[in-house]
Image (tube, grey):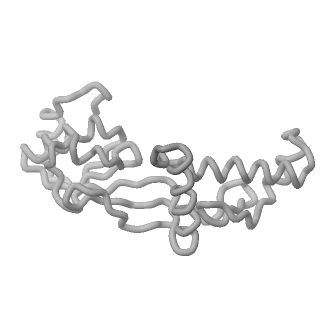
Amino acid sequence: FTNDKATDFTAILTSLKGKKPDVVFFGGMDAVAGPMLRQMKQLGIEAKFMGGDGICTAELPKLSAGTISDSQVVCAEAGGVEGESKKSLDAFKAKFKEKNKVEVQIYAPYVYDAVNVMVDAMVKAKSADPKVYLPVLAKTSDYKGVTGTIAFDAKGDIKNGALTLYTYKGGNREQLAVVR
C-alpha cells in the first residue's frame, strides 16, 4: 500500500520482487505510477504493470523516465469504439478540435452522448421533469451516438458496454483491444 504523495516505493517493490509476480496491479494515477515503474526497472522487476485510466496517459512514458519496456504496461479505459462507430467518433473529435482549439479529453464523447440521450428522452417525453422523462430514457434501445449505438437493459445498465485496453510501445500508447 502507498499513497498519492509517495515517491519511494523501494520497500514495497523489494517485498514484491521476492514473490516474483507476473503482474503488478496499480490503482492510482500516472504521477505515482511513473516513479514506481522507474523503481521497478531499477530493482529488476519484469512483471506486467496493469492499471486503469489514471495511468493510461501520454505522460506515463515521460513520468517513468522512459523505463517502460514494450508491452509491459496494460491499462484500461471505460468505453470503446470500433468499426463503423469509429468514423463518427473521428468526425466528433475533428469538429471539437476545430471549434475549441484543444484535443478531446478522455470521456468527452461519452458525456456528449449521455447528454444527447437525455435530451432525446426529454423531447420524446415532451418534458424536462425527471418523473416524466426518466421512464422514456430507460427504454432507450437504439440511439445512434458518436460513440456507437446506445441502449439500456432492464436494470438501466448500458448494453454491450466496452472497455478499451492499451499498451505502450516505443513510448507511445497503442490500442490492444476493445473488450465487451
Is the residue 99 above or below the residue 169 in the image?
above
Is the residue 12 above or below the residue 76 in the image?
above
Q: Position of residue 165 (x, y in %)?
A: 39, 61
Q: Residue at x 7, y 44 (%)?
A: 43
Is the residue 83 above or below the residue 69 in the image?
below
Quadrant of the rendering where the N terminus is positioned: top left
Position of 157 with respect to 32 (left or right) is right
Closest to the observer: 57 or 138? 57
Q: Position of residue 118 (x, y in %)?
A: 76, 49
Residue 174, picture quadrant: bottom left
Position of 14 with respect to 54 (left or right) is left
Q: Residue at x 12, y 34 (%)?
A: 10
Q: Residue at x 86, y 51 (%)?
A: 123
Residue reaching furthest to the bottom = 83
Position of 141 with respect to 15 (left or right) is right
Q: Position of residue 178 (x, y in %)?
A: 46, 66
